[in-house]
Image: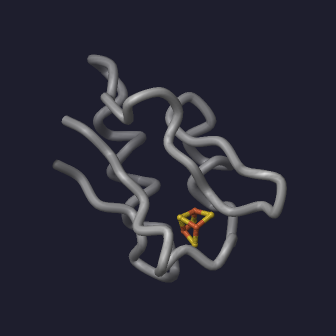
Amino acid sequence: MKVQIDAERCQGHGRCYDLAPGLFGDDDEGYGQVLGDGLVPPGQEQTARLAVANCPERAIETL
Ligand code: F3S
């Protein structure tokens, strides 16, 4: 599983990096960014889905 953030949708709500700090970080303006290449390590799939479900802008996609 892989995650990516649609930068055009992200409004910087920050729930992704609060809920899944191992998968997401923030840029200087508080917009979410995937860490590394966005590949979700084994065992973190549920955390990734939690972040997807909690983004108010539906900006996070899984591949
Ligand atoms: Fe952006 Fe959604 Fe995270 S709006 S900062 S991707 S919770």
**Residue drawn 68% across the image and 49% down it:** 18
Dividing the picture into quarters, in which one does residue 41 lie? top left
Determine whether, in the image, residue 54 is placed left or right of residue 48.
Answer: right
In the image, ligand 1 is in what quadrant?
bottom right
Its colouring scheme is one colour
**Residue drawn 19% across the image and 35% down it:** 1
Q: Is residue 25 above or below residue 31?
A: above
Determine whether, in the image, residue 24 is placed left or right of residue 25.
Answer: left
Residue 32 in percent (x, y) is at 61, 56
Residue 31 in percent (x, y) is at 68, 63
**Residue drawn 41% across the image and 53% down it:** 50
Q: Is residue 29 above or below residue 37?
A: below
* Picture mark count: 0
Determine whether, in the image, residue 52 is placed left or right of residue 14.
Answer: left
Residue 62 in percent (x, y) is at 23, 52
Residue at the limit of the structure toward the right, as seen here: 28
Q: Is residue 55 above or below residue 24?
A: below
**Residue drawn 16% across the image and 48% down it:** 63
Residue 42 in percent (x, y) is at 27, 17
- The front one of 36 and 42 is 36
